[in-house]
Image: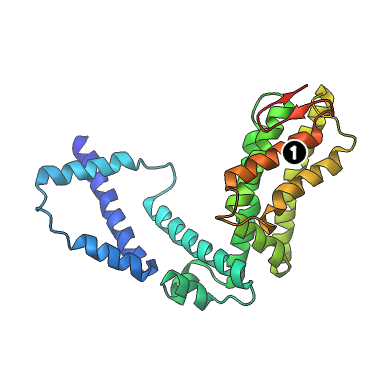
Amino acid sequence: MEFNAWILAASESFVNAVRDWMMDRGQTEQEKRSLKAKNTTKRPPPTRRMKRSRVESDAKARPPRAGVTLWDDVIALKRDRIVQAAAALFYERGYRQATVDAIAQQMGATKPFVYYHFKSKTDLLVEICERATGDTLAATEHVMSMTGNPRNRLEEFVRAFTKVALERHQFVAVYYREQIDLPVVVSERIHAMRREIDARLRSLLNAGIATGDFDIDDPSLTGLIIAGMMSFAFAWYRDGGRLSAQEVTEYIVAMALRLVSPSSSHCSANRCSA
């Protein structure tokens, strides 16, 4: 049994080595020079005991996930790198002006490398736009499963939504600017996700009205105002600006709570008091 476990660990180490070799074509020239410099450092040859210890350590550090192979991880890593480069260029130049050649050049890779993972530039746009909304949907789904009073849950909802919107602000910006170029079926799919997010927000507002935590006359309109405040932060937020992403997030949380709380209460991102 111990020998079989060692063989499995050795196999995983070998696949990791193959992954590193295959990722070389997607590395920038700076990364390649850095890696070459590290590899030129002389080290004593490893003993058999050292090799076995290293393999077993690697296996413990990366426990296998059910149904997911190391090869799947490699593919996901490559796709994510391409998507990040594409999002940056679409954000900077616009979808129609950015080319696949430019995306590959920014990565220090080749155009065939990009086309191996995405059939077209449209597929890249689809991936970016679906991530922008899908990540928000996932974050709010977690909040909806939480217990607690409506005010605390709304606070966490706004925080989770805004955090994704700021971390993915380039993705969100690309979606709002370039959605006209999305296939109709994709647009409908994204709109369905957005409607689900809006419905979750309304349900929290209605729950707060029922408990007396919120004093609002129109939960649907209030939900749209709060959602707009979170979503459209991409239009003015910039990395390295006057406020950090966390500070902006907490400010938006405080404003959302102030909007829904009874007028006799003073609310902050942490508490409401009479």
Of 145 and 165, nearer the camera is: 165
Q: Residue furthest front?
A: 242
The C terminus - image quarter: top right
Image quarter of the N terminus: top left
Residue identifier under label 1? 256
The number of numbered badges drawn on the structure is 1
What residue sits 68% from the left and 37% below the top? 157
Q: Is residue 176 left or right of residue 82?
A: right
Q: Position of residue 25 (x, y in %)?
A: 36, 69
Residue closest to the eye, 170 or 1:
170
Quarter of the figure with residue 60: top left
Identity of the amino acid at label 1? Answer: Ala
**Picture quadrant where residue 99 is located:** bottom right
Above or below, 100 relative to 169: below
User: In the rendered image, is residue 20 in sight?
Assistant: yes
Q: Position of residue 158 (x, y in %)?
A: 68, 39
**Residue 144 horizontal/vertical position (percent):** 67, 33
- Which class describes the residues within 10 Å of circle 1: few (<14), some (14-19), or many (20+)? many
251 with respect to 109 (left or right): right
Task: Please tell me whether mark 1 sits on a helix, a strand or a loop.
Answer: helix
Where residue 163 sits, quadrant-wise, is: top right
Point 72% across, 54% down: residue: 232
Judge from the rendering whether residue 7 lies leftward or rightward of residue 23; answer left or right.
left
Task: Give 96 or 113, whichever is nearer the viewer.
Answer: 96
Q: Residue at x 43, y 75 (%)?
A: 110
Colour scheme of this structure image?
A: rainbow
Residue at image position (46%, 76%) is: 111
- Note whether residue 135 is visible: no
Q: Position of residue 231 (x, y in %)?
A: 71, 51
213 up-or-down from 183: above or below: above
Q: Residue furthest right?
A: 217
